[in-house]
Amino acid sequence: MIADLIRDDQFIELEKEYKFLARARGEQLANGEYVIVDVETTGLEPAQSELTEIGALKIKAGEIKDIFSSLIRPKNPIPPEITRLTGIDDAMVKDFPGAGPILEKFSLFAGPNIIIAHNTDFDVPFLKHHLKQTSGRELNNETICTLKTSRLLLPNLPNHKLHTIAQHFGLTAQNRHRAMGDVELTFQIWLKFIDLLKDKGIMTKRELDALTSQL
């Protein structure tokens, strides 16, 4: 198995001399093309709640290549507690399309790229459910979760919320609890994580997946 081979001490020594052997690891994380995404919603469950905003950055080799950002008009009124948290109210979204057209555009924006989110177990099910519901299409992109990566790299943090990780690195972002604000912060954190992963010898998504799957 490749996963066992690349951890073999003899392979690691050979790789130092024969650089082409690094291809067995797959594309390196630092050189990858990703879509970093965050969603705002009316609740916690995709089947009972709606999307109100999607924000995303397309990045390649650590540089921003494109931006996607849109509010979404849900079918039902936005709960007051959600407005207090996000600042998004019914008046803000009344002139925007519903989820279907926005998700179609996001699907094209994301293409086949790996999706990064802080807690993919929340954002990705919302995207999958509502894309399937509105267009019948599947979202099958591979994912990287910065929440799980944080648990791997920063086990001593009191928690692994986005703002806690940001404070650890001395990072700040505007408009917390809005999609693009959280995407910006996730992007900055991901760049920090790539350096920490390199220090641990974790160079590819395959290697990262093998470790985070054990958490």
Image (cartoon, helix red, strand yellow):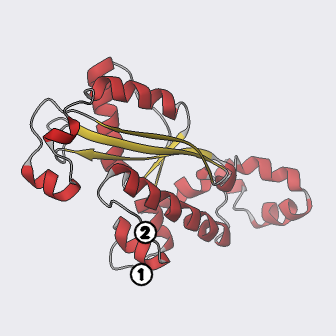
Kind of residue at badge 2: Arg
Give 111 or 15, whichever is nearer the viewer.
111
Which mark is drawn over residue 156?
A: 1
Quadrant of the snapshot with the C terminus: bottom left
Image coordinates for residue 127, horizontal then vertical, percent: 34, 36
Residue beneath the point at 34% across and 23% down: 101
Residue beneath the point at 46% across and 72% down: 171
Would residue 8 appear left or right of 174 to someone viewing this image? right
Residue 50 visible in rendering:
yes
Kind of residue at badge 1: Asn
Residue under numbered circle 2: 151
Image coordinates for residue 36, horizontal then vertical, percent: 48, 48
Would residue 17 appear left or right of 57 to someone viewing this image? right
Of pointers 2 and 1, the one earlier in the residue sequence: 2
Image coordinates for residue 168, horizontal then vertical, percent: 44, 78
Image coordinates for residue 159, horizontal then vertical, percent: 33, 74
- Furthest-right residue in this view: 17
Residue beneath the point at 22% across and 54% down: 86
Label 2, residues with CA under 10 Å away: few <14, some 14-19, many ≥20: some
Residue beneath the point at 33% across and 18% down: 136
**Residue 176, above or below 89:** below
Secondary structure type for disc 1? loop
Give 9 or 186, whichever is nearer the viewer.
186
**Residue 163, above or below 102:** below
Residue 214 visible in rendering:
no
